[in-house]
Amino acid sequence: MWRLFQYPLCPFSRKVRFACAVKAVPVELVLEKPWERRDEFAALNPAGQTPVMQKGEITLIDSAAICDYFEETVDRVPLLGSGPEDRAEARRLIAWFDQKFYAEVTAPLLSERMYKRLYSKQAPDAGAVRTASRNAEGHLDYLDFLLDRRRWLSGPAFGLADIAAAAQISVADYLGGIDWDGHEPARIWYSALKSRPTFRPLLAERMEGLPPPSHYDKLDF
Amino acid sequence: MWRLFQYPLCPFSRKVRFACAVKAVPVELVLEKPWERRDEFAALNPAGQTPVMQKGEITLIDSAAICDYFEETVDRVPLLGSGPEDRAEARRLIAWFDQKFYAEVTAPLLSERMYKRLYSKQAPDAGAVRTASRNAEGHLDYLDFLLDRRRWLSGPAFGLADIAAAAQISVADYLGGIDWDGHEPARIWYSALKSRPTFRPLLAERMEGLPPPSHYDKLDF
Ligand SMILES: N[C@@H](CCC(=O)N[C@@H](CS)C(=O)NCC(=O)O)C(=O)O
Ligand SMILES: N[C@@H](CCC(=O)N[C@@H](CS)C(=O)NCC(=O)O)C(=O)O
């Protein structure tokens, strides 16, 4: 079985877990906190980052490379769209959430509300949290814009763009950075994802010492 | 013909240009300085970033999505390797250079030595430049390590990992951030790339008001 090195609030690991669940690829979870900089983990991934997938001699690194690998090797439920233009649009949005949403929203929230609380025992910087929440607002506006025109984020079919977005948003939501008010299209889309048996297990997990807001795993939020 | 919105020192645009040259896809260059935030450009790419490729109704955004698009649509010179494991290794290294090298080396050098010099008319922060150069040193060590074991960065064949690396490194080198001393394997690899007719035109270009160091476009450096 594939082993996935991850921790519960790593958004890139969530993306891999959600994609593997949809493709029915069984995955055994191994808890890895990258900030502890374990030597064995650095030997596995010189970038020192989660997620890493491993089975026998094969080590897969970087969530985009991992998702592409399973897209190429598991025919069941294609997740990137049919033509090259559809796939380019899916990849544009995956990069948007992996890089832009992560840098502007998820990474500062993880740093201020997870890392400082659990590890460096500092108070969060209120300004940084406010900026991240305001950035999240802009991203939800963009989701609304897309979902007014499309059934799913990158087109008519559910796929990796939805998975990448749900992965980042669910972590930001866990950390209290998402205000759903006034974002009906995004809320309806996320509610549909929350009810999927392939996504629900992720929402049931907790980072010890850091409870999510009460709406976090509710279908009606 | 495809039109590429780019500026001479954008490493992601260099990656796309190099890949298109190798695949013999003709590209017309359109100068776009993303920091000027032109409204028409924001309408083309809501992320406001270069590179963007456009032809007729098709708009391609994000250098990885663009390279994947041409990998899928142009059979000539496959650039990602043959099996899924080879492709995963190539993608790992592409992400390494696009994200890690860019964040640790190219982005701070662009900010300190291009943007401040040409646009905000400030002196560069010497500490930030020193840190970027020290980070570059670590990346060259990693190149040496890989090239002691492999003909090209991701395996026996030249491909997108080499292109992504050359794109970032050439910008860092233009900005004086690369010290080749003591990095023979990396130097030999880069020298072989510099002599390719598909890469040379990039090295002949200049950002006005910002000359590169004299070794920059020499084959013997
Ligand atoms: N491009 C990588 C990004 C992975 C990443 O940033 N992981 C974070 C955890 S959410 C990490 O390990 N950070 C520790 C570090 O960068 O040192 C991917 O998509 O897998
Ligand atoms: N993931 C994107 C990154 C592109 C990128 O960061 N472009 C820079 C220029 S080198 C940019 O446009 N920055 C302006 C901004 O982010 O506002 C890609 O691979 O194309």
Image (tube, coloured by chain):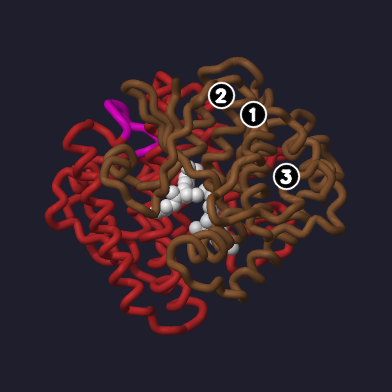
Chain colours: A red, B brown
Which residue in the structure is indicated by mark 1?
B80
Of the residues under marks 1 and 2, which one precedes in the sequence? Answer: 2
- Find numbered disc 2 in the image and state the secondary structure of the residue it sits on: helix
Quadrant in which the N terminus of chain B appears = top left
Query: Which tag is nearer the camera, tag 3 or tag 2?
Result: 3
Report whether the residue tagged 1 is closer than 8 Å to ligand 2: no
On whether disc 1 and disc 2 are found on a single subunit, the reply is: yes
Q: Is mark 3 within 8 Å of ligand 2?
A: no
Residues tagged 1 and 2 counted as in contact (Cβ below 8 A): yes
Q: Looking at the picture, which amino acid does disc 3 mark?
A: Asp
Q: Give the range drawn in magenta.
A: A154-161
Q: Which residue is drawn at 68% across and 65% down?
A: B133
Locate residue B39: give its quadrant: top left
List the residue tagged with mark 2: B71
Instruction: Give the amino acid type for the residue marked by disc 1 in the picture.
Output: Leu
Disc number for residue B217: 3
Q: Name which residue lies at 53% across and 43% down.
A: B12
Say if the magenta span includes residue B206. no
The picture places residue A92, in percent across and down from the top left corner, at: 40, 37
Q: Nearer the viewer, mark 3 or mark 1?
A: 3
> Which residue sits furthest top?
B75
Specify the principal SS of the magenta part: loop
Residue B177 picture location, percent across and down: 68, 60
